[in-house]
Image (tube, grey):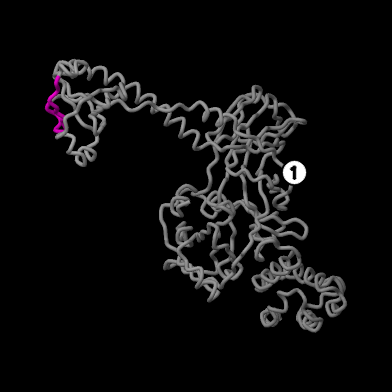
Amino acid sequence: MYNKLEKLIQQNRENLDSLEPSHDLWDKIQSQLPNTGPGNGPDGGNGGQGGGASAGAKAGALIKWAAAVVTAGVMGTVAFFALQGDKDQSKPDTVLEPGHELVVGNDQNSGAPPLLIQPPVPEADVPFMTFTFNAEKGKTIRLDNGTVITVPPHTFVDKMGAPITGPVELKYREFHDAADLLLSGITMKYHSGDTLADFQTAGMNEIRGSQNGEEIFFAEGKSIGIDLASFTDEKDHRLYYLDEASGHGWTDIGVADIVPNVEKALAKSQLQELPAEPRKPILKGQTQKVLDFAVDYEQFPELRTYKDVQWEYQDVAQLEENQWIFGEAWSEASLKVKDAESGLYTLELKNKRKSFSTPVRPILNAEDYAKELKKFNLRLDAYQKAKAARDEKERWMAMQADLTRHFDISQWGGYNCDRILTRSDLVQPRIKIELPSHPEIDVKDLTVFHFVGQMRACLPYPMNRTERIGFVFNELNAFVVVLPNQEFAVFSPKDFKALDQATIRKENKVTLALQAVEGIHNPEDLRIALGI
């Protein structure tokens, strides 16, 4: 009997998947079911009289009945039917991106909420930072990117509501681009009412708190302030909370306030220009770039001080192009200090017809060289310290976001400053994904991740549904597939830019040949592999 039922379902898979099978088909299915009496058939009534119930009710009844007969060898077929039915029943009317699957994790029929955080390669997941502090004193935590976490004193209680004292541990991590999103495995699908869409992030975080391995909770009326670093000044992002307990996904909880990063702006205003780097004095005999003029010191007494000094010219190309200066009789000559720290002078020559100037440095005898070398070493040490401090300040400023997004939290979890991804001029050609050869590849088990939205959105597609992929030619696009054994295949924005747009538009098809990359251990490795 069960073999007949399985065969019947397989023969009518397309009709069953639509959740709109004919009454005749239901009658055929029910005729194969055991007659267990009233109330025990798949529609909750007599096993042979299901034609009058709705298709949705019958689908639900059949699913429930399937759970009771999984040991009869039909579990795989019925489970597939149940999943398809659930997906189609909840399909929204409004889809802002090309019809994506709502893929959020574990078996929806298990009764457990879906897993909303599933890193594809756990070893490459975005790591948590850990901060330990006294709960009674609180803590202000400042991150290198500009994020500030403000924990007031006496914020936490235990599961019984008693105030927490002593050291507590706060775990925290952030996500700012598609590489972070992919490797964290956090769903970026938004499903609310009739809207199913993808998110484009302006910054996301996850925060947890514990003491001695036990979760701690927020005292009534207490909250933590989050100033989340954001690397875009777009103002149409809203704030969402990831509801993991129910598996609902992202819930809109309002708007985060945009706050300028005052510390970065102040540091930038106080950044001073470095002086010219000191230059080592020149000892006579160490250079061949010597300017040697016959000077009439009666006519130029001001140059008598430099009587025994030779001069090294600094601009070789200039001297090579102006050899004529050595045949001129100059009526005026002067030396002016250009940069005392580096010992640089400007030699100016004039007569009635012409003028010429060039940078020069004195060539010293042994005694004067020793004195100047000591001065040079002191100046060089001071310069190197000043440069190191400036370089460190510039490095810090480069990591800092120009603004933060402020919000207060009173429960642990994930928070996301997002907007729904919308794209105009979307092109959807027939796409063929070519993967590097791999002995363990089973294409139907793979997902291709499409990086879009200024690399701040990550759209997953089953490999057998690539017809749903759409892109905009003048935007950054990248594609990533996680292969077996934690390997990756990528198609970078540079690869995408090299595609022939005219041919793709004309033929309405494109082949994306992904390249295998090794050594992806974290999001930064993936960014480097993609060149983003």
Residue 264, picture quadrant? top right
**Residue 286 within the segment the image draws in magenta:** yes
Quadrant containing the N terminus is bottom right
The one nearer the camera, 442 or 255, is 255
Please, which residue is most extreme toward the front here?
Answer: 352
- Where is residue 251 shown, x and y percent of the image? 73, 49
Is 270 placed left or right of 280 in the picture? right
Residue 485 visible in this rendered orientation of the protein = no
Measuring 71% from the left and 68% from the top, which residue is drawn there?
82
Q: How many labels does the image show?
A: 1
Residue 190, picture quadrant? bottom right
**Residue 80 within the segment the image draws in magenta:** no
Overall secondary structure of the magenta section = loop
- Where is residue 322 shown, x and y percent of the image? 20, 39
Amino acid marked by disc 1: Gly
- Where is residue 138 shown, x and y percent of the image? 64, 25
Residue 500 visible in this rendered orientation of the protein = yes
Query: For mark 1, what is the residue?
Result: 254
The one nearer the camera, 169 or 424, is 424
The region drawn magenta spans 285-296
Measuring 59% from the left and 35% from the top, which residue is drawn there?
147
Measuring 65% from the left and 44% from the top, which residue is drawn there?
414
Relative to 272, say whether 124 is above or below.
below
The one nearer the camera, 72 or 440, is 440
Mark 1 packing: few (<14 Cα in 10 Å), some, or many (20+)? few
Relative to 292, say whether 15 is above or below.
below
The one nearer the camera, 478 or 263, is 263
Is 467 placed left or right of 518 in the picture? right
SS under mark 1: strand
- Where is residue 201 shown, x and y percent of the image? 62, 49
